[in-house]
Image: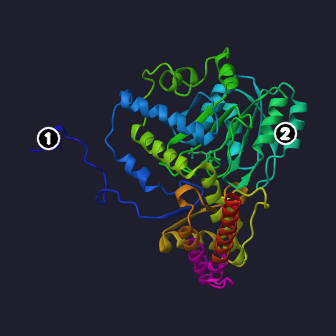
Amino acid sequence: MSAQHALNLKPVNTTKKITSFHPPLRALMGPGPSEINPRVLAQMSLPAIGYLDPIFVEMMEELKTLLRYAYQTENALTFPVSGPGSVGMEACFVNAVSPGDKVIIGRNGVFGGRMIENVQRAGGVAVVVEDTWGEPVDPNKIEDAFKKNPDAKILGFVHAETSTGCQSDAKTLCAIATKYGALNIVDAVTSLAGTPVLVDEWGIDAIYSGSQKCLSCTPGLSPVSFSERFVAHVKARKETVHSWFMDLNLVLNYWGNTNRTYHHTAPTNGLFALHESLLLLQEEGLEGAWARHQRHHLALKAGLEAMGLTYLVKEGNRLPQMNSVYVPAGLPEGGEAQVRKTLLNDFNLEIGAGLGPLAGKIWRFGLMGYSCKAENVMLCLSALGSVMADMGLAVKVGGAEAAAHHAYAELHKQAALEMTAAKQQLAA
Ligand SMILES: Cc1ncc(COP(=O)(O)O)c(C=O)c1O
């Protein structure tokens, strides 16, 4: 008689035999996660060590140093929160907002809406400044909100709205908050390492990001950074922070400079991975990473436009790493979802759908981190062109690839000219 029988244990309840899970190899061009760099993946399979092992603690210090580079800050309190971007968001709000505090939130997409919920759940009063989805948070409206609400203590907004592909002017918005004596909280989940995020120069007080977008790391970590002003505000709170896990005063016992005592079991292998992805970022250089995102965006844009697709966001406000275009007219009913399904099933290519009021109206093409490369741009244009043509749209198959090729060729020509000019200047 087996032990299982003797104890009358319930068997695994399934009609389908469960075997090891082997995900397919997909090109990830949705709103995140992005593809994980193989060097980062390799780090995840290294043997685990204890989260208080002196060697791990040394690595934590390096992580903080590398994160300060990524964020361009000297903030002492810069570390990865154990949890996805949503936990980073919640950590900022739950520490900053005391019951009754007035918080101005600029909402121009899904994630500004989440900020409002965070304010309310922390017992604060959200003053919501609305902007059309696809447009940036309007600094004039934010300034008006401060004039009408001089007692507002905090401003929150999303730097890079993933739901639309629009970038807001973080520097100007933070300066307005500072002018009115308020702290600011900035969502940089999609912007960090894709477009400039200059924490010290822009006067950002609290910022959070996600490991799974332009950092090309495993999902589930949220790099955060807090100014001294923000830390002083949290320390001066009269009310205890309403979350044990995210209370900065307690987290500091593990991630702070002097103490290193148990707070929670750190996700060790995920942190090995983040260390490697930040190292990759340092090797490429922030400017190199920003330029790569811009270069492939320009090629993708040339191809999408050659297929007759138009961008949701105006030029100048567009995020290179998140390209939103209107779904073309002329698709049969259910065609929008069918296109995405065919791309996934026949081409192993994931793209994103629209959310909220933009559901069914836009497609979102991510070019984030390790996913931001020429082979993905070309695969996407080729696959999308053939699927749309199959569905009866007037698309010239091959036209988009030619347009992207032309954009790349122009960029290469320009880079070569700049290189020659720089060499001539050096020789002179
Ligand atoms: C702008 C923005 N903020 C917050 C989040 C939440 O991050 P996560 O899904 O890692 O919890 C996302 C996720 O896509 C995002 O794009």
- Regarding mark 1 in the picture, which secondary structure is present there? helix
Q: Nearer the viewer, residue 289 or 390?
A: 289
How crowded pointer 2 is (Cα within 10 Å; few <14, some 14-19, many 20+) is rated as many
Q: In this view, does 155 lie to the left or right of 252?
A: right
Coordinates of residue 37 in the picture (x, y in percent): 46, 55
Point out the residue furthest to the left here.
1
Alpha carbon separation for disc pair 1 and 2: 67 Å
**Residue 213 position (above or below residue 79):** below
What residue is rendered at 53% in x and 21% in y?
250
Say what amino acid the circle numbered 2 marks. Ile
> Does residue 399 belong to the magenta stretch?
yes
What residue is rendered at 34% in x and 57% in y?
21
Residue 219 appearing in the image: no
Q: Is residue 114 left or right of residue 269?
A: right
**Residue 203 position (above or below residue 27):** above
Q: In this view, does 258 lie to the left or right of 6?
A: right
What residue is rendered at 75% in x and 23% in y?
100
* Colour mapping: rainbow
Coordinates of residue 353 in the picture (x, y in percent): 63, 62
Task: Residue 142: give its label.
Answer: 2
Magenta stretch in the rendered image = 380-404
What residue is rendered at 61% in x and 17% in y?
240
Residue 10 appearing in the image: yes
Q: Nearer the viewer, residue 18 or 202?
A: 202
Point out the residue furthest to the front here.
428
Coordinates of residue 103 in the picture (x, y in percent): 76, 31
Residue 173: image quadrant is top right
